[in-house]
Amino acid sequence: MKIAIDFHHLRLPRKRFEISTGVRTTADVFIVKASADNISGWGSGTPAESLSDSPIKCKEALSHARESSIDIDRFFEHDLTFGIRERSKAAAAALDIAMWDLRGKIEGKSISRLLGGIPKALETAATIDIKPVNGAVEDAERLLEKGFMTLKIKIGRSIREDLKRVRAIREKVGSNIRLFVDANGGYNFEKAICFWTEASDIMLDLFEQPIGADQIPSLARLKNDHGIRVCADESAVDESSLERLIRSEAVDLINIKLMKFGGVSPTIKMIEMAENAGIEIMIGCMGDIGLSISAAAHLACTVDPAYVDLDSHLNIEPICDGPVVREGQISMGDSPGTGVRLRESWEQWQVK
């Protein structure tokens, strides 16, 4: 069955979001449509500078895919997105998700079912970005009222300010809420040790990407010599980098994101590699909208992640009708494919 591919570039407003590497107020999103026999599957991709990806690269990769001949059976039998992943991970992810959505609609099954799982509600973390202490505490209070039981706090700019913010949040939320921090590589080795030591009374679950992505030997020292529970994000972006982390025994967890690995299909292999090495996983996101968030959540239903961190669609202009997050849990339902549909107004955000 031959597939016709089309795509659209959108620029969506988003809630101001600050991390150690910069501030974001918009999200560049690519929507992919994969059609066959009057049935269409939809996927989305968000190119990230941290992956050396960009809207230009994503557009070029999807233009190439649009001109290619894709057969649905061969797509799932062979790794047909590899060449696209070499150009743009986000493009490959958007195409892959669209193909899974199409396959689900053809077979009448949700992505969870296609992967051998069952759709279910999953507890997800919510993220508090870098901001003044009062604003961060207000965010924490608001998220508690919405039922979130796990909060990720962005840090990595200033140890003193980060400690003030994280400690104030702990005081506000009490001891029953899980907290962890993410520096996005913003600290160096010494600062990471200093922060974790000073934060010993705050009861933090883990430290996500405390130092630069390429500093794997130092990550291993943080974990093995200093007792820090380390989660890798930017350090784990493909099979070779994950293999290096495994060989170095550098981390306790891996943040698994469809945008880093190029979609559902290649991500499954990354999860298997991590689990076989005894490394826990977090299913996360990076500026995803509902289409790709739902695909990641369906994938999470088929494994046993230590953490789920799928909240970015809540902070970006909503152009999808889901997935629903209620009382701190994300739910997909059991509709075919992703179970998420674009709203009629989505095309107004297209980049001309």
Image (cartoon, helix red, strand yellow):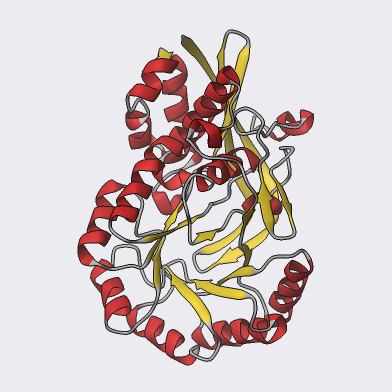
Q: Nearer the viewer, residue 310 or 47?
A: 310
Residue 65 placement (x, y as % from top left): 43, 22
Residue 41 found in image quarter: top right
Which residue does the image show at 53% across and 44% down from the upper left? 296
**Toward which corner of the image does residue 23 lie, by quadrant?**
bottom right
Q: Pinpoint residue 251: horizontal percent, then vertical percent.
A: 33, 67
Image check: 133 left or right of 110?
Answer: right
Q: Position of residue 262 (x, y in %)?
A: 42, 39
Q: Quadrant of the C terminus?
A: top right
Is 173 placed left or right of 263 in the picture? right
Q: Is residue 38 above or below residue 331?
A: above
Residue 215 shows up from this direction: yes
Determine whether 281 is above or below 159 in the image.
above
Tell whether 185 sits left or right of 322.
left
Relative to 71, does residue 179 appear above or below in the rendering? Answer: below
- Residue 33, can we see it? no
Q: Nearer the viewer, residue 139 or 277?
A: 277
Q: Residue at x 41, y 16 (%)?
A: 73
Total marks shown come to 0
The one of 22 and 118 positioned closer to us in this rendering? 118
Quarter holding residue 295: top right
Q: Residue at x 47, y 18 (%)?
A: 66
Q: Locate residue 210, reporting x and y percent.
A: 41, 73
Residue drawn at x 70%, y 80% is 173
